[in-house]
Image: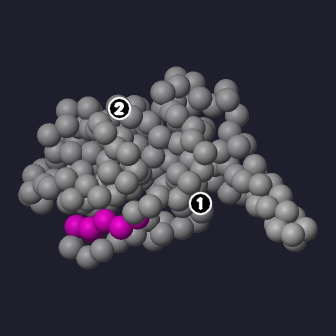
Amino acid sequence: MLLKVALGLYGFGLALATPAAALDASLLSGQMEKLELVAPYPPAITSYLREDGSVGDISDYAGDVVVLNFWATWCAPCRAEMPSLQALQDTLGDEGVEVVTIAFGRHNPDAMKRFWQDTGVTSLPLHLDPQAEMAKALGVEGLPHTFILGPNGEVLAELTGEANWAAPETVALLRSLVPN
């Protein structure tokens, strides 16, 4: 019994030491004011389809902070924010932050590629959640919807709606989550 209590307290201490607990409230300003911090949790469904049709998994990005963005070709706010996601990847991609984009629902691959071309995306992944299983499991109800996952793969925060992901306050917030 004492061992269970000790292990429970150890686990609680580890939870308190996660990046979400260490976030400075002053970093939730400007574009990040809408960011909703959540109690860290692992996503129930983590698989998606890659552009080549193979199955990928969020665990492929283990150790990195992941900005997981759900979008659609028909979504005007998605179109507006996509260049800032590309700029974020360009800025922080070498620092342990990965922007992972997943198209929500069924999409024509050619339309997805045109969307990338039209929005200036050059290096973001072209992943797909064709049955919206991952999106539903995460509670996506509107687009764009973006989740921030810590290096251990747990969801730390989410933001529904368009944001400027390349804004200085956003970059500062994400850098604060990268392990030293």
- Which percent across, then down, holds residue 153? 54, 61
Decide: is 92 above or below 27.
below
Name, please, the residue furthest toward the bottom: 54
State the residue at coordinates (57%, 24%): 29
Crowd around label 1: few <14 · some 14–19 · many ≥20 (10 Å): many
Type of amino acid at the residue the image marks with label 1: Pro
Left or right of 149, for residue 52: left
Q: CA distance from mark 1 to mark 2?
A: 24 Å
State the residue at coordinates (20%, 32%): 76
SS state under label 1: loop
Name, please, the residue furthest toward the right: 2
Q: Which residues are magenta?
A: 46-51
Type of amino acid at the residue the image marks with label 2: Gly
Q: Which residue is mark 2?
A: 161
Q: Which of the 4 image quarters holds residue 5?
A: bottom right
Left or right of 95, for residue 51: left
Name, please, the residue furthest toward the front: 1
Q: Which residue is mark 1?
A: 151
Left or right of 87, for residue 61: right
Q: Which of the 4 image quarters holds residue 151?
A: bottom right
What is the basis of the colouring in this image? one colour
